[in-house]
Amino acid sequence: MSEALRSQTISGLRWTVVNAIGEKILSFGTTVVLARILDPRDFGLYALTFVAIDSLGAFKNLGLDAAIVQRQDRIDEAADTAFIVQPIIAGVTYLLLALASPWIAHALNHPELARPIQMLGLILLVMSFGNVPAALIQKRMLFRMRTVSNLIGMMVYSVLAVVLALRGAGVFSLISAYLARWIVCTTIQWFSLGWTPGWRFDWGLFKEMIRFSKYIVGTWTLAFLSMNIDRMVIGRWLGITQLGYYTLCMGLANLVAIQISARAYQVVFPAFSQVQRTPELIKSGFLKLIQYLLLAAIPMALLLYYLADDLLRAFYGPKWLVAAPILRVLAIFGIAETIRLGTDSALLGAGKQRLVFKLSLVHLAVQMTGGVWMAYRGSTTGVAAMVTLASGLPALVMLWSMSWTLHLRAADWWRALRTTALSSVAMIAALTLGHATRAIIMGSNKPSGLWLASVVLGSLTAYAATLLWSDRVVARDAWHMVSKRG
């Protein structure tokens, strides 16, 4: 890898991690406050409103922003062409959505959704003016710029959502804050990038971009169904309150998948695209990617699985305790989804968009059939189990495909994952010990905040200490990620 690309990739990963951690701290803190102000039903309405918006979201930009990132030539002309087309597409899409909102609300069995859908749908127009600048930022790997704009927007969301919730705005406090967040973020990116559209439209170039992006749009369409079929069946047949419980648990379980894997896509996709003709670089980069994704995903999953009741009581209050079984199942989902999303970016960067599309079909088929079946049986936990299975199967196929393509042997995988395995065993031992001391010290009493903090800190310390003891290279790489010199 050239020194310039290596430096850009390391810097991009560093700022992606900063973005992920900063956004999750703000998001988690905001959710802790809102969970004590709002009713679970408000979270359910918000989640179901997003289902309606996302139903047309895959077509709002035709995948032209991804085509800009992937291109190697005529970047400025491609950006101008995409910028002219996208607001038109978004305007038509929003008009259709606004007109269809009463029908969509009725189809989801909740007529009160019509107004929230019309209001949140405005995000399509906001995004249409920010997609091209965001794609150029990703193409040029200017991730510091993206991080700063996103975190400022997230701060606006946090403050506004809490203020409006205290004033009794209910679900509209979440919707208004979300719109404000992306208006601020888009505005900052425009001014920071300093990009001015050239107002050039090239029909031949547009068709060329569409030929690439059609697989992206197809994958996004399947991703929408895969990401929302669970919410649709729960909201439709099990009720808005159950959807509120499920949505909050999914947010916790999906922490690493969304904040790390999905954001790593912004770095891994362009980086792998530039070295797609160099198998050795793809091989070493892929193993390193899987290693670090699992290093981040496993400790989170273990905490959620072993401490589900205690974490829900401590952060969200007793009214959320009924969601503990859902959270335990979704903790396993978090690992599977992290691998699936992370491998997606590597496959796309390596030019295997057809395989990604086909595996998205598998993901959707398992989730749809299993989710509908479990919802029909009245089990929200069962829906969570089907979602976990739907992510796990494609993840395994993706790993097998890359192993076969890159000629990876068992020894290669063991060298990459040995540290993760040892660290996980140490953390499980620490959590088991924590549960044993709880039974001895407190008996049947509710656990104290001090006990919970001690168990969390102790288990994470055991994980980190074992990691550093078994592989000093991890410590060096982590230092490179956070240090400017690295």
Image (cartoon, rainbow, N blue to C red):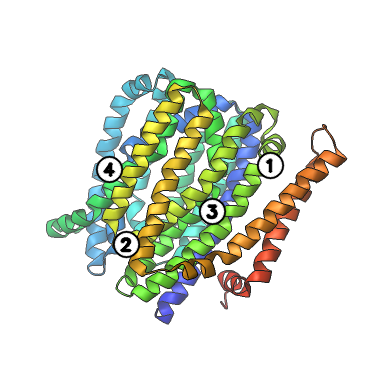
The amino acid type, in three-letter code, at marker 2 is Val
Question: Separation of disc 1 and disc 3 at Cα?
Answer: 29 Å
Q: Nearer the viewer, mark 4 or mark 1?
A: 1
Quarter of the rendering occupied by the N terminus: bottom left
Question: Separation of disc 4 and disc 1 at Cα?
Answer: 40 Å
Residue 480 percent location from the top left of the image: 57, 73
Task: Tell me whether circle 4 and circle 1 mark residues in contact (CB < 8 Å).
Answer: no
The amino acid type, in three-letter code, at marker 3 is Leu
Element carrying mark 4: loop
Q: Which mark is residue 307?
A: 1
Residue 143 percent location from the top left of the image: 46, 63
Q: Decide which of 81, 410 is in the foreground and name it.
A: 410
**Earlier residue among tags 3 and 4:** 4
Mark 1 surroundings within 10 Å by alpha-carbon count, few (fewer than 14), some (14 through 19), many (20 or more): some
Residue 223 percent location from the top left of the image: 36, 43
Q: In terms of image quadrants, where is residue 329?
A: top right
The residue that disc 2 covers is: 69
The residue that disc 4 covers is: 59
